[in-house]
Amino acid sequence: MIYLDWAATAIPKNKIIIESTKEGLKLYGNPSSTHKQGVSAKNVLENCRERCGKLLGAESDSLYFTSGASESNSIAILSFLKRHSSGEIITTSIEHPSVLEPIDQLKKFGYKVHIVNPKESGLLNLKKLEKSINTQTKLISIIYVHNETGVIQPIDEIIEIIRKKELEFDRKIHIHLDGVQAVGKIPVNIESLNVDSFSISGHKFGAPKGIGILYLRKSREVLIKGGGQERGIRPGTENLIQILSITNCLEDTLINFENKYEELNRVLDRVINGVRSIGINTIPKTRLLSDSNFVPNILSLTAPPIGGEVLARILDNDDISISTGSACSNNKKSTTKGILSMGITKDEGFSSFRISIGITTKDNDIDLFLEKTKVALSKFTI
């Protein structure tokens, strides 16, 4: 089996997860209880929070453990139903469904939504973004690293534009970053980004599914209430096994980070050279080798006339796993909508697919993928 769908979910760090599970099972007390077992669990919980804070460059009391990035995005975005009765929101056409869906809910309650498209390069049009900001803007939500193309948005420039507009209008604007594909792929220091909220998914870097982190600069009113856990932001008894797992997996991911980054770049360059040699285009076409505007593990491709889903099925029969877009959406039309806004044709969108690699991806895996893909393409050549 050759696994080339790491952006959907990373191969789990089983050894770390098993050890974390063993430790967590010993801490069976409820962290909210005042007896010794509860206090022991609470101490480990807060220790994990502190460790994650140091790894992510964030104050520990600004981090909240959630079930994943989808919940983190929803908590941050839907909190606006508690804060404002109306206003304007700015987001982009390449956002993940877990951002677009809660924003659509806000729209139903009277918020006006502005959508900013990227340029053909995948980078946002910053002039259009700046023009969209006005005195009614309450929230701006940006995807840090695009899950389909791997493009890294110029966040420092974007934040500077927004904060200058805040001063000009004397109005506070909440900036939310979807950081799912950034953490573990590029250096991330949340505090230095100067954002108000930031979402993280554990299974993207080898932790189990069902655990994530939400960074909130300031606490806020949320829709779902319960027992007051996670300081009222995310009610429900904390899952200490999962929290230990995400903490330990994040720590492991960031060990020798520069060496891992360089190796991913080397392997992905092999993919880029290989696919271009058999007539497959990258999205965008201008993507360079070891391109600093992209993470080194995600590559969007298109190979007309063969459909992306058809190619994925053919390769799956050869035990090669690729993707046709976001794994969180089973609708191909919705997953290609984002990359279509980058200016590619409908045929290119129909034929698009994604390769995403990880730390265990080998040259032989890439060579076999290229060999099988070339055979598949030959069957559709007119």
Image: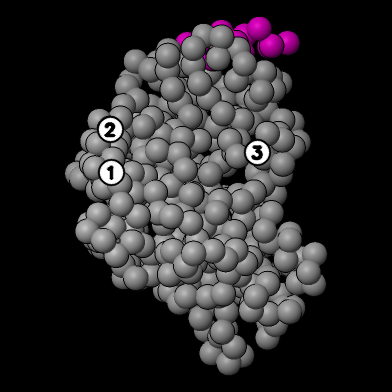
Please identify, in this view, whether the residue under mark 2 or under mark 3 is nearer the observer: 2
Instruction: From the image, tell me which residue sits under label 1.
Output: 24
Q: Quadrant of residue 15?
A: top left
372 in magenta: yes
Identify residue type, mark 1. Answer: Gly
Could you tell whether 164 is left or right of 90 in the image?
left
Instruction: From the image, tell me which residue sits under label 3.
Output: 329
Please identify, in this view, whether the residue under mark 1 or under mark 3 is nearer the observer: 1
Q: Nearer the viewer, residue 339 or 207?
A: 207
Return the disc, 1 or 3, that comes first in the chain's sequence. Answer: 1
Return the disc, 2 or 1, that comes first in the chain's sequence. Answer: 2
Image quadrant in which the N terminus is located: top left
Q: Are circles 2 and 1 on residues that touch, CB within 8 Å?
A: no
Q: Which residues are magenta?
A: 371-382
Name the residue located 25 percent from the left edge and 54 percent from the top edge: 37
Instruction: From the image, tell me which residue sits under label 2.
Output: 18
Identify residue type, mark 3. Answer: Ser
How dense is the environment of label 1, judged by Cα within 10 Å: few (below 14), some, or many (20 and up)? many
- In x, y percent, where is residue 3? 43, 22
Q: What is the spatial separation of the Cα atoms under label 2 and label 1, in whole angstroms?
A: 10 Å
